[in-house]
Amino acid sequence: MEMKRCKECGKMFLPTSKRQQYCNELHYRPCPVCGKMVEARYLSDPARCCSSECKKQLAAKNRRSVVVTAAELADEPLDIKDGQIAEYRGPKVGLWIPGHRYVINIDAKHTTYGQYKIWATKDLTSDSGVKLLMPLSSQNSIDRYFTLI
């Protein structure tokens, strides 16, 4: 086998298999909270915390960011109201056809993933009843895919 460059530290090493990407040296990464160097046990994993105190701080920070994101989504105003006519501008996805006009409804109840559910009940361009669903994550996504008529 020929020498490879370690993806973590950049040193050259002789791999024991074709798929090996990291050398067998010890590698260190900074703690995501305080910056202290911590041994990286599994190089495919994200950086680890150096202590239980840093681990608690990181968990609290992540919980706060999720709560803030959900709160921001819940307070977000919707420009498109139920039963309005909108033209779909996105790419062809399933039966959603670009340029077609639909009667749409929005289920503003956020799922676990914080998504709006956009339902189309009628395709006005082809004058047919439809049952289409498109989950979108934000008002910006809705505005990007739909234009009110």
Image: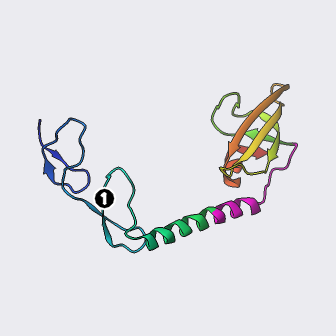
Residue ID at (74%, 36%): 133
Task: Residue 121 in the image: state x and y as whole percent.
Answer: 84, 33
Residue ID at (69%, 63%): 72
Task: Residue 6 in the image: state x and y as whole percent.
Answer: 21, 50
Task: Residue 31 in the image: state x and y as whole percent.
Answer: 37, 68
Where does label 1 land, which residue?
Answer: 40
Quarter of the figure with the C terminus: top right
Q: What amino acid type should be assigned to the residue bearing mark 1?
A: Ala
The answer to whether 123 appears left or right of 134 in the picture is right
Viewer-proximal residue, 29 or 5?
29
Task: Residue 98 in the image: state x and y as whole percent.
Answer: 69, 33
Viewer-proximal residue, 45 or 99?
45
Viewer-proximal residue, 87 or 75?
75
Residue 102 located within the stretch drawn in magenta:
no
Q: Is residue 118 above or below residue 128?
A: below
Q: Quadrant location of residue 8?
A: bottom left
Q: Residues within 10 Å of mark 1 (few under 14, many from 20)?
A: some
**Secondary structure state at the residue bearing disc 1:** loop
Q: Which residues are magenta?
A: 67-83
Residue 72 located within the stretch drawn in magenta:
yes
Q: Quadrant location of residue 86?
A: top right
Residue ID at (65%, 39%): 90
Residue ID at (64%, 31%): 92
Quarter of the figure with the N terminus: top left
